[in-house]
Image (cartoon, rainbow, N blue to C red):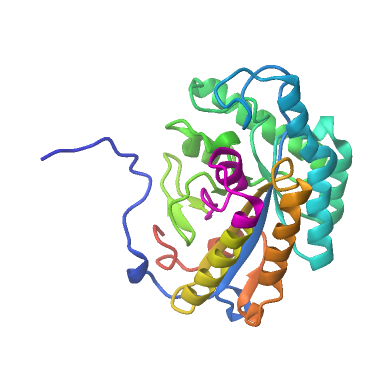
Amino acid sequence: MLKLPSHKRYDYLPITKRQHYSWPGGKRLAFYVALNIEHFAFGAGLGIDPHNRTGPQTSRNWAWRDYGNRIGNWRFFEILDELKLPASILLNSTVCYEYPEIVEKIKQRGDDVLGHGRTNAEVLRGMWEEDEKRVIQECVDVITKHVGVRPTGWMGAGAAETNVTPDLLKEAGFTHLLDWPVDDQPIWMKTRSGPILSVPYPMELNDAGTLALRDHSGREFADMIVDQFEELLEASEKQPLVFSLSLHGFILGQPFRLRPLRQAIKHCVQHKNADQVWFTRAGEIAKYCYGMKPGIIPGS
């Protein structure tokens, strides 16, 4: 019998055979917005480059990405403030000393801050274990110092892991990670030092892959948001589910994309059945799951 390499991180359990539960207040759909706030190396390292996807980094593309920190992320904050929405911030630790005004805004809003590596100019994949361990700890130390709260959630730069990343995260004190787009519900994953919670995070409803790499328009992405929300809200009548939306200021923060994005988010917030939606943060989802009895969340 053919046996393929396997990660052994979680067991298979179809959505139709899960234990029943609800989110706080009996709500059915947990909704969170993830803002990816990133800093890149100038003329070096990795980085999204829609103009020349396989070529070297250039000053033009560095400037395009820095637009997010100068303009786009601030437009996102305006939308979130207007709609009174919380957010989860996926934060490169180098942002803390390059853009202190952004950090102050995050602190003022009380947003959930997750480790997102040191910079998106590098990824963990390919690192030796000890080097990866040091990168994770540096991210923890810098964010703790500048934000004032130790991050307990993690989303790797470029969503790239090594085979031991979940183990290192658990050993570094992280309680949850967003790297595995495997489910519409949180699940427990196995590490060599005990379980860590996987909170749903989108590979598809993510402007980096959808717009910058697959060339969808901002209007098409807004339609995806609405369709995803409507379908999950309807399906959540049967099972509690998670809607997550991943945004980058240098992509959807562009004005012509920002307009349909604002309309799509308003559609969700002002929906006639919004009373069934828990508008929350990834960290709050994790905290709630940690408080549930064993046997309810898959893998517990």
Seen in the picture, residue 230 relative to 172 is either above or below; the reply is below
Seen in the picture, residue 132 relative to 140 is either above or below; the reply is above
Is-magenta flag for residue 28? no
Visible residue check, residue 9: yes
* Residue at the spot 18% in from the left edge and 38% down from the top edge: 3
Quadrant of residue 262 in the image? bottom right
Quadrant of residue 72 in the image? top right
Q: Residue 280 appears at what percent x and percent y?
A: 67, 64
* Residue at the spot 60% in from the left edge and 44% down from the top edge: 211
The residue lying toward the viewer, choosing from 139 and 211, is: 211
The residue lying toward the viewer, choosing from 200 and 209, is: 209
Is-magenta flag for residue 207? yes
**What's the magenta region?**
199-221
* Residue at the spot 86% in from the left edge and 49% down from the top edge: 105
Q: Residue 193 appears at what percent x and percent y?
A: 45, 41
Visible residue check, residue 48: no
Seen in the picture, residue 230 relative to 254 is either above or below; the reply is below
The residue lying toward the viewer, choosing from 133 and 279, is: 279
